[in-house]
Each structure stands twice: as structure tokens, then as C-alpha cells.
Image (cartoon, helix red, strand yellow):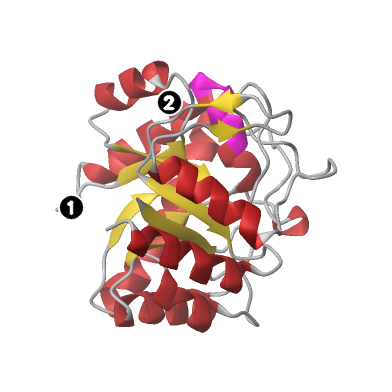
Amino acid sequence: MKLNCDLGEFANNNDAEIMPWIDMANIACGFHGSTPLTIKNTVKLAKQHQVTIGAHPSYPDVENFGRQTMQLPKSELIACIQYQIGALQGLCRAENAQVEYVKPHGALYNDMMKNLNLFEDICVAIAELNQSCQHSLALMIQALADNQAFDDIAKKHDIELYYEAFADRAYLDNGFLVPRNETGAVLADNQAVVERCQALLNQQPLLSINQQPLTFQLDALCVHGDTPNALAMLKALRQTINATK
């Protein structure tokens, strides 16, 4: 199981401390946070530590850090996603690095998991880029008890999916995340996060906020870079994952 983290979102950050502990970096592309220089420096860090690079596109919503739903026409949404991925690809080429996958940010991520039409629009945006890329981009999404509908759409567009769970977020009984504006949505207790990781590594269910068992097939485990105590959390998770190898 790979560790991934959302990075490059702020000019003043601890990305240099976080990067050695992760396998995959979801790098902001400017529409919810970051600047070209911050993005470029994050790419350099990822390359230095041999961390796989992913694009982290958002709704065009810097004011709300990409955490507010927006209703965009399909053509505009596709262009926004392609613009952000293309910007990161350009900065990666300048550093002799490569974007390997896409993971939408914030409200765009949550919305695509609840709206298959939006999910397909994102797949179309990636598929159009893949037509002219030597290396096809994969798409990272949330693991649910049943991802079949997402699998079917992705296969139609010849896109590989990576499935992730969240180490630092509470889950509802239906397998979706507790909204950030609700009490207990973000987990800051390292021990609780490590226990969740150990359960997942042992093929055991993840427990919802009401202690209901949730079973997923996973490729990756995410910690948000802006979660309090993110660095200590990632170090504890890395030790836990390495101990099972």
C-alpha cells in the first residue's frame, strides 16, 4: 500500500520534511492554491526523493481553497482540468520529471464520487490528454464498497484507476467522508490513524464514525498535507507499512 499526500499548496510549507516519507505526491496545480514557483519546487523535491508525481486539479476556486462545489459547463470543466494538468506537465518536463496520475482536489473530488456524469467528464479530460502523451495518466479515486460503475466508465476511456482510503478523515456509514464542517471529520490522533492503517494492511474493515465496518480494495492511503500533525502522522504510517514488508 502506497502513501500519498497533497502537497505544493502553500508557499510556506513543510513539504521538504514530508516528501521523504511518502510514495506519491498529489501536487497542486494553481486553481485552489500554490504558485508556479511553489509547484516547480515541489516537483524538484519529488524527483529528489523518487516520489511519484500526480496532478491535483481543482475547481477554479482559490477563494475557498477548492472546497466549494461549482456548476461548470462540461466544456469549461474539461478545459480547466486539462489546463492544470498541462501546467504541471510543463514544469515537470523542465525538471526531467513526469506526471503519472491525476487526483482531483477537494469539492471536485467529492463531487465526482457522487456524480457519475462529472466523473466521466474528468475521464474525458484525461483521455483527451492521453491521446497525445507517450505515457498515459491514471486517475486516483476514493475506494468504495462497490466501484463497479467507476470501473466501467474508466475502461470505456482506457484509463487506469488507483483506489485510495484516507488515514486522516472520518467515514460515514455509507463509505463516504464525513463533511469537513462537521465535528470529528478530521482525525489528528496518531494512534487512531496507525490502528486504521494496521487494520487495512491486515485486510480488516475500516470503521465508520458510528463503528460500522467498511471493506475496500486499496492501492493507496492518503494524509492531507494541511492536516494538523501531518508530518508525525506520515512518519508513524511509514513505519507501520514498512514493518509489514
Q: Residue 205 at x, y = what percent?
A: 50, 31
The residue under label 1 is 135
Does 122 appear in magenta?
no
Within-10-Å neighbours for mark 1: few <14, some 14–19, many 20+: few
Mark seen at residue 61: none
Q: Is residue 243 visible?
A: yes
Q: Are marks 2 and 1 in contact (CB under 8 Å)?
A: no
The residue under label 2 is 120
What residue lies at 52% left-to-right and 29% top-to-bottom? 74
**SS class of the residue under badge 1?**
loop
Left or right: 136 with respect to 185?
left
Q: Please tell me which residue lies in front, 243 or 174.
A: 243
Is 163 situated above or below 116? below
Does 112 appear in magenta?
yes
Q: Residue 82 at x, y = what percent?
A: 42, 48
Give the extent of the magenta segment. 110-117
Within-10-Å neighbours for mark 2: few <14, some 14–19, many 20+: some
Q: Label 2 sits on what residue type?
A: Glu
Extreme left residue here?
A: 134
Left or right: 22 with respect to 109?
left
Quarter of the picture containing the C terminus is bottom left
Q: Earlier in the sequence, mark 2 or mark 1?
A: 2
Q: Label 1 sits on what residue type?
A: His
**SS class of the residue under badge 2?**
helix
Q: Please tell me which residue lies in front, 95 or 8.
A: 8
Q: Residue 170 at x, y = what percent?
A: 68, 41
What residue lies at 72% left-to-right and 36% top-to-bottom? 178
Q: How much space separates mark 2 and mark 1, taking CA atoms?
A: 20 Å
Is 89 situated above or below 73? below
What residue lies at 69% left-to-right and 37% top-to-bottom? 70
Left or right: 52 with respect to 233?
left
Q: Is residue 32 visible?
A: no
